[in-house]
Image: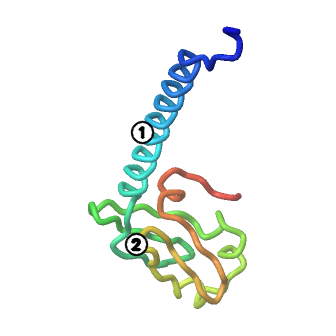
């Protein structure tokens, strides 16, 4: 009748595996939160001669040609100049063009064209 008795060692093994999985999940969540907190942040942005400039809070300045983004490429110079910072300086927004660009994507060179 031993086969009717619950196996406590199996339960302990499963609890151990669950605890390890939970701790790995917590570490992953903390790493993601840390990366999000360190996302690049812009202090200001502007457009000159169809080139978008972004000054970061650490005083670096980066730029890219508007031609790298289809909506910006098709925009008039007046529309391009209507850029605003959003999401605490982490994104560029052109309301009239319905275009959002993450500052981190610009710094990483992630362009659609």
Q: Quadrant of residue 93?
A: bottom right
The percent coordinates of residue 70 (x first, y second) are: 72, 70
The percent coordinates of residue 69 (x first, y second) are: 66, 67
Which one is in front, 47 or 98?
98
The percent coordinates of residue 15 (x first, y second) are: 51, 28
Q: Secondary structure at mark 2?
A: loop
The residue depicted at 38 percent of the width and 69 percent of the height is 42
Rendered image: mark on residue 89: 2
The residue depicted at 49 percent of the width and 40 percent of the height is 25
The percent coordinates of residue 64 (x first, y second) are: 53, 63
Q: How is the image coloured?
A: rainbow
Of callouts 1 and 2, which one flags the residue occurring earlier in the amino acid sequence? 1
Which quarter of the rendered picture does the C terminus lie within? bottom right
The residue depicted at 34 percent of the width and 65 percent of the height is 56
Left or right: 79 in relation to 70 = left
Rendered image: mark on residue 41: none
Q: CA distance from mark 1 to mark 2?
A: 27 Å
Above or below — where is 27 with respect to 32? above
Query: Label 1, on which residue?
Result: 27
Residue occupying the far left of the picture: 58
Which quarter of the rendered picture does the N terminus lie within? top right
Q: Secondary structure at mark 1?
A: helix
């Amino acid at each position: 009748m031993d086969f009717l008795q619950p196996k406590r060692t199996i339960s302990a093994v499963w609890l151990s595996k669950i605890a390890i999985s939970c701790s790995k999940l917590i570490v992953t969540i903390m790493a993601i939160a840390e990366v999000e907190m360190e996302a690049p942040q812009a202090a200001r942005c502007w457009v000159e001669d169809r080139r978008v400039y972004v000054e970061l809070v650490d005083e670096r300045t980066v730029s890219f040609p508007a031609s790298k983004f289809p909506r910006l490429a098709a925009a008039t110079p007046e529309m391009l100049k209507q850029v605003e910072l959003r999401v605490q300086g982490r994104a560029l927004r052109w309301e009239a063009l319905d275009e959002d660009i993450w500052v981190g994507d610009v710094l990483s060179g992630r362009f659609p064209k």
